Amino acid sequence: MQHKLLFFFLFFFSFFGNAQQRVLTVKDSITNEALPFASVSLLNGFGMFTDDNGQVTIGQDAAEKIKITYVGYASKTVSISQLKNTIIFLKPEANALSEVKVVASKKNKKTRKDFTVKPQLHDNINKMYWSSIGQQYAFYIPSSKEDGILKSITIPLIVQDIHQGMAEDSFEINPYGTMVKVEFLSSANNLPDAKLNEYEKKVIIHSGKVSGQITIDFEEEIEIPEEGLFVAMTIIGKTNKQGIYVPEMPYAIRELPDRKKKILKIILPNYALVEAPKGQLTYFRNVFSDITKWERITRPMVYKNEKEYPFLNVGIGYTFSGY
């Protein structure tokens, strides 16, 4: 081939064998209530989230130590081999986040209008980016009208498979859902910063039910600060046929002649990319990585080795109201 197509990772490898597993439950140390979707870092660049019951299954060869974090609680690092039981308790901390409040304006609300920025859609797999468990994206929303209220966002998606024989099945043959968490971050010098408010929303993006885009509405009035805000989207993981999130190890094990290699699992959704400055300013990172710095997208998921690429954004759309 004249141009060699390179892939960041191999896709959808088979399960990592019959290694012994351990089921852990994360709970509130005071109320004894389970903490769903707590972040469980394996401290090796990989991680996963607890399910609705606060449970997660850890493979035997995953890690000796894990770090559990949850918003509003003190994080905790534990040694799996030294755990006396399967329950891990987190201690609540004072929550300094502000509640989402209805914006009360002195102006006549009859004059408030809706404005829409259209998403930039395409189905070119050569201009596509990927998702993995713990991958987090941040899309910048500027403040362009007085007293702006963000009402919804529209994410351009590419629902195509490019496994090219690297996996047993295509997700086009066996469709599944991916749960994502949407929240809001403040903007500091046009970079994603601290969590802006308490609002969070879980959304399931299903490969068999979306085509080209998905619109996410916000039930609360999200005020757009003067400096703008970032919509953050975190990839939680796959869901079953009933739409329930089921934790799984974020990698598979590939048997090599001399060693075992961890292969990152890439999952839906795939995002449609556009060359900057088109699209909304986009950053990404992995919540389980030691590198907390937000990065720009510098090349698509499938790329030509010899080609230089500009910065890339996801061309999200959004609707807001303002004066």
Image (tube, rainbow, N blue to C red):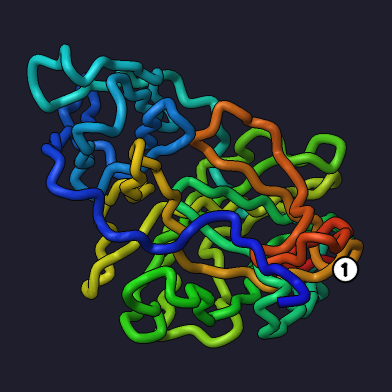
Residue shown at 57% from the left, 48% from the top: 136
Quarter of the image for the C terminus: give it.
Answer: bottom right
Secondary element type, mark 1: loop
Viewer-proximal residue, 15 or 217?
Answer: 15
Viewer-proximal residue, 37 or 161?
Answer: 161
Give the percent coordinates (x, y) of residue 245. Answer: 28, 58
Q: Quadrant of residue 319?
A: bottom right
Q: Quadrant of residue 108?
A: bottom right
Examine the rendered structure and indicate whether residue 174 appears above or below residue 216. below
Residue highlighted by disc 1: 278
Q: Answer yes or no: is residue 106 visible.
A: no
Examine the rendered structure and indicate whether residue 239 appears above or below residue 175. above
Residue type at numbered disc 1: Lys
The extreme top residue here reads: 82
Quarter of the image for the N terminus: give it.
Answer: bottom right
Examine the rendered structure and indicate whether residue 98 appears above or below residue 63. below
Residue shown at 40% from the left, 18% from the top: 74
Give the percent coordinates (x, y) of residue 210. Answer: 49, 84
Q: Quadrant of residue 209?
A: bottom left
Q: How many marks?
A: 1
Q: Is residue 16 left or right of residue 259?
A: left
Q: Answer yes or no: is residue 83 visible.
A: yes
Give the percent coordinates (x, y) of residue 35. Answer: 27, 37
The extreme left residue here reads: 85
